[in-house]
């Protein structure tokens, strides 16, 4: 067996983890082996806080409801990039109320204007929106048409995904006609759309910020809300007590962070590192350039044979 520098931490009791491409493929359910490995982890009194750009129902259907009901009380979901934090009751059902929600930051007028901005973006850039689906299904439907996107309104977050347009060919770049006020610099269509989106949101005084996420997503989320907020709230909202950790903050060597996008320029997983001890080990299961990691954190690259969710499964099964 290959010798690895990243070994299992026997003191581990609390994990903050991304979901997409860390626990499961995008819009796909977690594999049976992953569900089994997570169940074993929970049985050994390790608690999991999933922090993701997805909505709570998405993570439930793909991951949490596959777990035995008695183990779900050790799981918390930080949904919509930290806009909500949900826990589970002793019977395995989701609690009636979240530990906290940021959605009430928006007025009804803000929320309505935000949706109008999204529709304006679709018109201006001539986008063709589709409902979220696994990427292979999307490409079977759309081919390589760059203006076909997936649109997902998650309540406190709206996400546009560009599987065909985050790495445009020279031919595709030449065929795209942008609004007169926008220009395409480089090969990522998200960049001019993000700039225009933020301009419109600011013009209408909507407290929403635009940011790149994942490999090809563009998130519009409530300003001031990100994955670091979910970590902070997990320590301050009674979560640790309900997870059976006695309400105490675990020591730095009892906590880990798992993800696949710790690049400060192209990802958001590093934000989970911000609110806690900088010595906490964070593991990226993607081949990333460590030069792009923010300085001062203990972010390590998984050195096994597999990557993304297959890499995490390798890590869990090999301990």
Image (cartoon, rainbow, N blue to C red):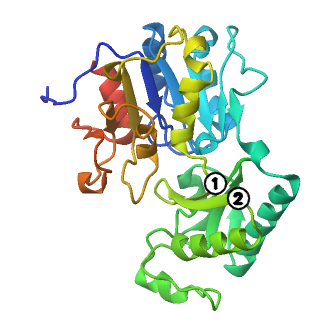
Q: Count the numbered circles shown.
A: 2
x, y (%) of residue 113?
A: 82, 64
Residue occupying the point 46% across, 20% down: 38
Front position in the image: 211 or 311: 211
Seen from this angle, which residue lies furthest right? 108
From the image, tell me which residue sits under label 1.
Answer: 223
| Disc 2 secondary structure class | loop
Name which of mark 1 and mark 2 comes first in the sequence: 2
Front position in the image: 188 or 157: 157
Residue occupying the point 74% across, 66% down: 118
x, y (%) of residue 191?
A: 52, 72
From the image, tell me which residue sits under label 2.
Answer: 207
Q: CA distance from mark 1 to mark 2?
A: 5 Å
Locate the N terminus and report the quarter of the image it occupies: top left
Residue occupying the point 34% across, 23% down: 252
Q: Residues within 10 Å of mark 2 (few under 14, many from 20)?
A: some
x, y (%) of residue 106?
A: 78, 51
Q: Is residue 5 above or below residue 272?
A: above
x, y (%) of residue 193?
A: 60, 73
- In which image quadrant can residue 307 be found? top left
């Amino acid at each position: 067996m290959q010798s690895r520098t990243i070994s299992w931490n026997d003191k581990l009791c609390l994990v903050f983890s991304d979901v997409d491409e860390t626990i499961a493929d995008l819009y796909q359910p977690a594999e049976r082996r992953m569900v089994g490995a997570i169940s074993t982890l929970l049985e050994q009194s390790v608690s999991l806080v999933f922090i993701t750009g997805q909505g709570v129902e998405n993570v439930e259907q793909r991951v949490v409801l596959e777990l035995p009901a008695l183990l779900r009380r050790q799981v918390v979901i930080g949904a919509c990039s930290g806009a909500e934090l949900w826990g589970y009751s002793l019977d395995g059902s989701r609690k009636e109320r979240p530990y906290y929600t940021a959605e009430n930051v928006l007025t009804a007028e803000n929320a309505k204007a935000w949706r109008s901005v999204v529709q304006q973006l679709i018109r201006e850039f001539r986008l063709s929106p589709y409902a979220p689906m696994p990427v292979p299904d999307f490409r079977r439907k759309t081919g390589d048409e760059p203006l076909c996107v997936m649109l997902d309104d998650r309540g406190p977050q709206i996400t546009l995904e560009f599987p065909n347009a985050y790495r445009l060919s020279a031919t595709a770049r030449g065929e795209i006609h942008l609004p007169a006020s926008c220009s395409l610099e480089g090969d990522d269509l998200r960049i001019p759309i993000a700039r225009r989106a933020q301009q419109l949101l600011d013009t209408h005084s909507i407290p929403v910020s635009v940011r790149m996420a994942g490999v090809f997503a563009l998130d519009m989320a409530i300003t001031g809300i990100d994955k670091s907020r979910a970590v902070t709230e997990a320590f301050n909202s009674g979560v640790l007590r309900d997870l059976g950790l006695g309400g105490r903050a675990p020591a730095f060597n009892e906590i880990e962070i798992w993800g696949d996008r710790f690049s400060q320029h192209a990802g958001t997983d590093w934000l989970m590192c911000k609110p806690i001890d900088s010595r906490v080990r964070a593991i990226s299961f993607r081949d990333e350039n460590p030069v792009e990691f923010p300085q001062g954190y203990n972010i390590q690259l998984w050195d096994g044979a597999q990557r993304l969710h297959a890499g995490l499964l390798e890590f869990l099964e090999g301990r």
